[in-house]
Amino acid sequence: MSNISFNRINAVVSEENLATINAHIDALLAILPANGMTPEERKAFRGMDVQNKAYAQDCINILKNSGPEVMPAYINVENLIADYALFEQMDKIKMRLKTALSYIETTQRIAGKEAYDMTRAVHNLYEIAAKSGVSGAKTAVKKLSERYEKQTGRKRIPNLEKGK
């Protein structure tokens, strides 16, 4: 176990800041074009990887240079160009959001580790207190040990009788 007194993050986001974050997320979602996909569509729709992106760029450049009049009327070149532009915009937004999400996940992981490590230390101290006969400690150890065993699958029920 690491040094339990070392606390890399000692902060809580205020309710006001949480409300601001959620309002900004809501605003972002409201600005973006409405869309949705069924699970079947999610499986079936081809993604745009690097090679597909280069191909799409080439196709659009050729259309722009040779003129859309080469295409039949049922091919809407403006829609194609708009879809590709939206893809590019979403790609840029996605990269920023991935950076933010990575930061959030890292912060959450550090805070979770620190909280869990400290609770394990507290559990150990309750065990010591129970062995020393401190009132109420034995009940706390029993409850914590039951929860610990359920979550980890490992038994952690020490002998709490004095002197053992």
Image (cartoon, rainbow, N blue to C red):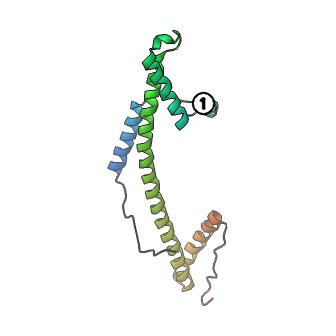
Given the current orientation, which residue lies at the most extreme bottom position? 163
Expressed as whole percent of the image width and height from the top left, the position of residue 64 reads 43, 19
Q: Is 78 situated left or right of 24 in this image? A: right
Please report the residue visible at 64 percent of the width from the left and 82 percent of the height from the top.
159
Q: Amino acid at mark 1?
A: Phe
Residue 48: image quadrant is: top right
Whether residue 75 is situated above or below residue 51 in the rendered picture: above
Residue at image position (49%, 27%) is 58
Vertical arrangement, residue 160 with respect to residue 153, above or below: below
Is the C terminus in the top left, top right, bottom left or bottom right quadrant? Answer: bottom right
Crowd around label 1: few <14 · some 14–19 · many ≥20 (10 Å): few
Q: Position of residue 39 (x, y in %)?
A: 62, 33
Report which residue position mark 1 lands on.
45
Q: Is residue 91 visible?
A: yes
| Image spot of residue 41 (x, y percent) | 61, 30
Residue 49 seen anywhere in this rendered image of the structure: no
Q: Residue at x 39, y 31 (%)?
A: 31
| Residue 50 image point, x, y percent | 52, 37
* Circle count: 1
Closer-to-camera residue (34/146): 34
> Residue at the spot x=45%, y=49% of the render?
101
Of residues 23 and 130, the one nearer the viewer is 23
Kind of element beneath mark 1: loop
Residue 141's image quarter? bottom right
